Image (cartoon, grey):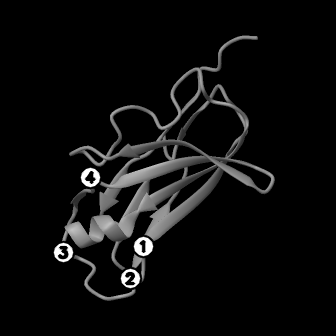
């Protein structure tokens, strides 16, 4: 079987401050029916990206995944979320990989009271 050449990346932008979201913890889970298995935990760098793909080349497989962005801790550290409980804390984004040879980019645009995502390039 040939090795999959696809991979998954992410990028977090802080819309409230107009800059990359440095230092945000992100967990990647693989979902299979009712089971949810942690694959890895990464942290964004000074460009709001992870130092490598969240799913590197050779590890991409058809399936359903979930990225959990630790937005509350990031917003606390940035001085942007002072209420308790926070409006946004953990942000799960479930997505499917249908083509393990493709690049999937799952960015997050974040503010203390909203977020958005899309399949990027």
Q: Secondary structure at mark 4?
A: loop
Alpha carbon distance from label 4 to label 3:
14 Å
Q: Which residue is mark 4?
A: 23
At a point 51% along the width and 28% down the height, the residue shown is 56
Q: Is residue 75 above or below residue 1?
A: below
At a point 39% along the width and 31% down the height, the residue shown is 52
Disc 2: CA contacts within 10 A as few (<14), some (14-19) or many (>=20)? some
Q: Which residue is mark 1?
A: 89
Q: Secondary structure at mark 3?
A: loop
At a point 29% along the width and 49% down the height, the residue shown is 48
Q: Which residue is mark 3?
A: 79
Q: Which residue is mark 2?
A: 86
**Contact, CB < 8 Å: mark 1 with mark 3?**
no
Q: Secondary structure at mark 1?
A: loop
At a point 21% along the width and 45% down the height, the residue shown is 46
For marks 3 and 2, the one nearer the N-term is 3
Alpha carbon distance from label 4 to label 2:
19 Å
């Amino acid at each position: 079987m040939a090795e999959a050449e696809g991979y998954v990346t992410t990028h977090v932008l802080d819309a409230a401050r107009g800059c990359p979201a440095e230092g945000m913890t992100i967990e990647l889970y693989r979902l299979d029916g009712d089971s949810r298995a942690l694959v890895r935990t990464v942290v964004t760098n000074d460009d709001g990206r992870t130092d490598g793909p969240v799913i590197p080349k050779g590890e991409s497989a058809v399936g359903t995944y979930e990225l959990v962005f630790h937005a509350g801790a990031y917003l606390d550290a940035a001085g942007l979320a002072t209420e308790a409980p926070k409006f946004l804390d953990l942000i799960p984004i479930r997505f499917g990989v249908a083509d393990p040879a493709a690049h999937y980019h799952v960015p997050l645009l974040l503010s203390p009271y909203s977020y958005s995502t899309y399949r990027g390039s």
